[in-house]
Image (cartoon, helix red, strand yellow):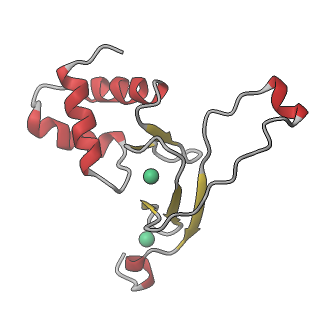
Amino acid sequence: MRETKQRRIILEELKKHMDHPGADELYHEVRKVLPRISLGTVYRNLDLLSECGVIRKLEYGSGQKRFDPNPQPHCHFRCVKCGSVKDLPFEIEVPEPDKNHPWLKTRKILGANLEYYGLCTECMAGEH
Ligand SMILES: [Zn+2]
Ligand SMILES: [Zn+2]
């Protein structure tokens, strides 16, 4: 993958956010550094980075896509009320499937998405 200045800055901005921002949110941040960048360019670069496994794309049905700077398997906590997605602050081992299972001979696993859901601190306190 060719490294461009735009892509480097998009990645740097994403790494500053541990709350898995959507492309729109990230676009506002990136524009502070690159005022002439378009939302389409931000989208394209995020898609490319996630296809190459540099970042991870989180998709929630019809909801907005979010982007995660950490491509390694890890667990998330999603708030069902405000939709925020955070990494768990402690390690939980993501289960590895049995690679010799016949079902996996004709399939390829690229990653895992382990998610807990519930109410975040702010929603628990009724602040949203
Ligand atoms: Zn919440
Ligand atoms: Zn994450």
From the viewer's perspective, is 115 left or right of 16? right
Q: Nearer the viewer, residue 16 or 105?
A: 105
Q: Residue at x 10, y 40 (%)?
A: 32
Q: Residue at x 12, y 25 (%)?
A: 36
The correct choice, above or below, for 102 with respect to 117 in the image is: above
Could you tell me residue 111's position as x and y percent?
60, 39
Q: In the rendered view of the protein, which quadrant contains the N terminus?
A: top left
Could you tell me residue 44's position as x and y percent?
36, 23
Query: Residue 104 lies in what quarter of the image?
Result: top right
Could you tell me residue 86's position as x and y percent?
42, 61
Q: Nearer the viewer, residue 3 or 98?
A: 98
The correct choice, above or below, for 65 with respect to 9 in the image is: below
Q: Residue at x 31, y 41 (%)?
A: 24
The answer to whether any part of residue 42 appears in the image is yes
From the viewer's perspective, is 110 left or right of 98? left
Q: In the rendered view of the protein, which quadrant contains the C terminus?
A: bottom left
Query: Residue 118 lies in what quarter of the image?
Result: bottom right
The answer to whether any part of residue 38 appears in the image is no
| Residue furthest to the top | 2
Could you tell me residue 57's position as x and y percent?
47, 39
Q: Nearer the viewer, residue 91 or 103?
A: 91
